[in-house]
Image (spheres, rainbow, N blue to C red):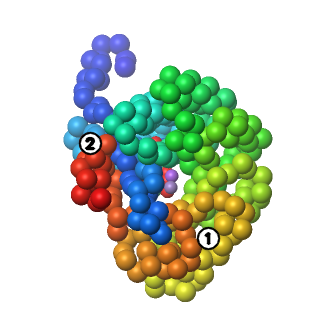
Amino acid sequence: VRPGEPPEPAGDVGEIMMYYQPQIAIATGELVGVEALLRWRHPRRGMVDPEELIRVAEQSAVMRLLTRRVVDDVMEQLAKWSAAGLRLRAAVNVSVRDLHTGEIADQIADRLARHGLAPDRLQLEITEGALMADPRRVLTTITRLHRIGVGIALDDFGTGYSSLQHLRRLPLSEVKVDRSFVLGMVDDADDAAIVRSTIELAKALGLRVVAEGVEDERSWRMLHAAGCDAAQGWFYARPMPAEELVAWMARYR
Ligand code: G
Ligand code: G
Ligand code: NA
Ligand code: MN
């Protein structure tokens, strides 16, 4: 602001909130967990999805604050579900910058203790592309989280670089088949082959495998036949606020 000019009005920036998408065990139909997905309720634009927000936040210290807030919100929610007798597991997406220091591991250890939560109730989803930035420091943080007992999922599998190296080097508990392959698998034999091989590979390595982007019954059937452990997608449920999830669960049972 130049001298003499009025400052920008502060305005209403809206609020950020978490949505949760159910993850379903394919063989039993049981709800096994949720993926927490950030949303920004903008005063004029309505719900803004996170990609845009994160792209901007990642260019500054804002990302650190955002992730800290997301982890706090999700862990508080897990504690509330626990108190209500719901043993859900929640997956949180983290950005590569969040893993460059041990701060997130300190925060998670502190909140697990504070809420009396078992560490395996929490899982972090890491994208392959993101791992490229500073592999050593990222690996240090991931290893610490793994030792605490927090699950680590390799997200968007197949779309990044050196996928197979990541499978060997990281202390993973889960692989998430990227939705682009899952969305295409019903009509495209190549996509179907990639999904099946990913499932087989993950299982051979002793990892749980979760498919995302399951939009119809045919993909669900194919995943079932291929031995995929769990799935999420519009066929089951869209991401929704925590309050709606409880109502959804009551209908789903
Ligand atoms: O929910 P949606 O399809 O709009 O998510 C878009 C992208 O934003 C996904 O790739 C997802 O991994 C990412 N994302 C969603 N929530 C978070 C979050 O809390 N933190 C980070 N770092 N990424 C998120
Ligand atoms: O972190 P990741 O990019 O994997 O995040 C999952 C994204 O996929 C979220 O943005 C979520 O809103 C979106 N999503 C979840 N289920 C479906 C689905 O069935 N179809 C499509 N097209 N997108 C989905
Ligand atoms: Na994710
Ligand atoms: Mn994902």
Q: Amino acid at mark 1?
A: Ile
Regarding residue 123, the answer to whether it shows in the image is yes
Q: Position of residue 159 (x, y in %)?
A: 61, 64
Q: Where is mark 2, residue-wise?
A: 243
Q: Residue at x 33, y 37 (%)?
A: 84
Q: Position of residue 225 (x, y in %)?
A: 52, 80
The answer to which of marks 2 and 1 sits earlier in the sequence is 1
Secondary structure of residue under mark 1: helix
Q: Residue at x 43, y 74 (%)?
A: 220
Q: Position of residue 156 (x, y in %)?
A: 56, 60
> Is 209 placed above or below 93 here?
below
Secondary structure of residue under mark 2: helix
The answer to which image quadrant residue 150 occupies is top right
Cβ atoms under marks 2 and 1 closer than 8 Å: no
Q: Position of residue 136 (x, y in %)?
A: 77, 41
Quadrant the N terminus occupies: top left
Q: Is residue 126 left or right of residue 57?
A: right
Q: How dense is the environment of label 1, judged by Cα within 10 Å: few (below 14), some, or many (20 and up)?
A: many
Q: Where is mark 1, residue-wise?
A: 199
> Is 159 placed above or below 79 here?
below
Q: Is residue 37 left or right of residue 114?
A: left
> Is 212 placed above or below 240 here?
below
The answer to which image quadrant residue 86 occupies is top left
Regarding residue 61, the answer to whether it shows in the image is no
Q: Amino acid at mark 2?
A: Glu
Residue 162, which numbered label?
A: none
In the depicted view, which residue is nearer to us: 113 or 138? 113
